[in-house]
Image (cartoon, grey):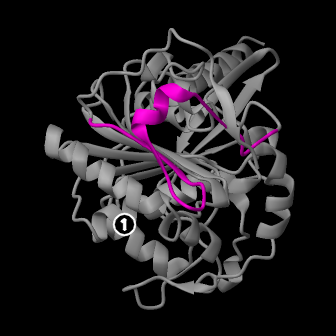
């Protein structure tokens, strides 16, 4: 009986050791990224905040998700592509000594239809300058062929002029994670940024094995966090018998899951191998949960309301805003500009899709 008891104690101690620590240190292998728990739990708050529809509160960083680990962040560019229901921001996090870029993901109301579409999506676009590399047209388009890209690139240039060659951290959840990956690659290849880190949450697959090979060499400091049975992380499907032709995840994955005995439950953050498709990580379970897709590290991701593409702002932002003929909005200021005074009247809706 004592032997069985000590065996249980040993198992629990091992689980506790596995899960303990704010920063999980992993040695570099073949140039793969090192997972940092603290950084990931900070960036997921940026990935959550970018969903907010009140542009006044988001631009001034006073929204209900603009606090905690991201307190003191300064937005210098907020762009809303109204035509395609896309949103992203660029700003400076002085505590990280970094430029942070975040992209909004698919809205909760449309996830079910979006998931059904992804089951049938085929690789349909040759990535420029990368022989045999193919990607998902929709994800590529969302970053490269909308209002998003030029605004992000210009904001990064302005921030670097003031702060120098500081790190660039790109993040996003769901489709926002796909856009973050394309952004990190774009900044590295086309704008010669040598200090780009990408951390995504619940990101779908975006390209084939050839694309993954290029991406891994060019943006090695990339972490994809997946959660339990998150359905989106399994899409579009990976077919192991057609590994070169099918969609393929790039490394490095960190899979969050829970283990326990009775009432003792521990969270494990497993750092996966360098393949991008580690069979012992998220691929070891069925991806069938939308709820696991909408919460990472205890942080809610997705829009707060049902009116998913609604824009809310007030007259205080007039001095910072421009709007093109299609109705797309760009809110911009120099990093040294004063923050919008939030003590006046509440925001009012100006657009709804």
Tell me if 161 is positioned left or right of 9 in this view. Answer: left
Instruction: Please state which of residues 318 and 48 is positioned toward the viewer in this rendering.
Output: 318
Quadrant location of the N terminus?
top right
Question: Where is residue 276 drawn, in percent x and y?
Answer: 53, 63
Above or below, 42 against 102 in this view is above
Q: Quadrant of residue 194?
A: bottom left
Secondary structure state at the residue bearing disc 1: helix
Could you say which quadrant of the image residue 169 lies in? top left
The one nearer the camera, 210 or 12, is 210
- Mark 1 lies on residue: 186
Q: Give above or below for 20 relative to 323.
A: above
**Residue shown at 62% from the left, 81% from the top:** 243
**Can residue 28 be spotted in the picture?**
no
Q: Is residue 33 left or right of residue 44?
A: left
| Magenta region | 307-334
The residue depicted at 27 percent of the width and 28 percent of the height is 337
Q: Residue at x 39, y 61 (%)?
A: 150
Q: Position of residue 317 (x, y in %)?
A: 47, 31
């Amino acid at each position: 009986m004592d032997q069985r008891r000590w065996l249980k104690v040993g198992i629990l101690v091992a689980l506790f050791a596995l899960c303990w620590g704010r920063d999980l240190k992993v040695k570099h292998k073949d140039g793969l990224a090192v997972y940092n728990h603290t950084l990931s739990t900070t960036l997921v708050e940026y990935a959550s905040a970018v969903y907010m529809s009140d542009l006044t509160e988001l631009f001034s960083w006073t929204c209900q998700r603009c606090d905690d680990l991201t307190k003191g962040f300064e937005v210098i560019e907020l762009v809303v592509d109204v035509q395609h229901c896309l949103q992203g921001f660029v700003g400076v996090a002085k505590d990280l000594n970094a430029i942070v870029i975040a992209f909004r993901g698919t809205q909760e109301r449309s996830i079910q239809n979006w998931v059904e579409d992804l089951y049938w999506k085929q690789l349909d676009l040759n990535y420029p300058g990368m022989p045999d590399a193919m990607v998902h047209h929709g994800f590529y388009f969302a970053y490269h062929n909308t209002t998003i890209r030029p605004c992000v690139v210009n904001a990064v240039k302005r921030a670097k002029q003031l702060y120098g060659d500081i790190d660039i951290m790109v993040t996003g959840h769901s489709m926002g994670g796909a856009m973050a990956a394309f952004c990190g690659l774009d900044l590295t290849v086309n704008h010669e940024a040598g200090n780009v880190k990408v951390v995504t949450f619940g990101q779908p697959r975006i390209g084939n094995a050839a694309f993954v090979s290029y991406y891994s060499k060019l943006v090695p400091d990339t972490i994809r966090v997946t959660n339990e049975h998150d359905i989106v992380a399994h899409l579009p499907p990976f077919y192991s018998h057609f590994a070169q032709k099918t969609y393929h995840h790039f490394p490095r994955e960190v899979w969050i899951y829970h283990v326990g005995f009775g009432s003792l439950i521990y969270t494990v953050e497993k750092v996966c191998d360098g393949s991008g498709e580690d069979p012992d990580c998220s691929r070891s379970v069925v991806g069938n949960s939308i709820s696991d897709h909408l919460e990472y590290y205890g942080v809610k991701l997705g829009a707060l309301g049902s009116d998913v593409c609604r824009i809310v702002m007030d007259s205080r932002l007039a001095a910072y805003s421009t709007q093109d003929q299609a109705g797309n909005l760009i809110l911009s200021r120099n990093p040294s500009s004063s923050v919008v005074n939030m003590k006046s009247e509440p925001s009012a809706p100006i657009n709804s899709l």
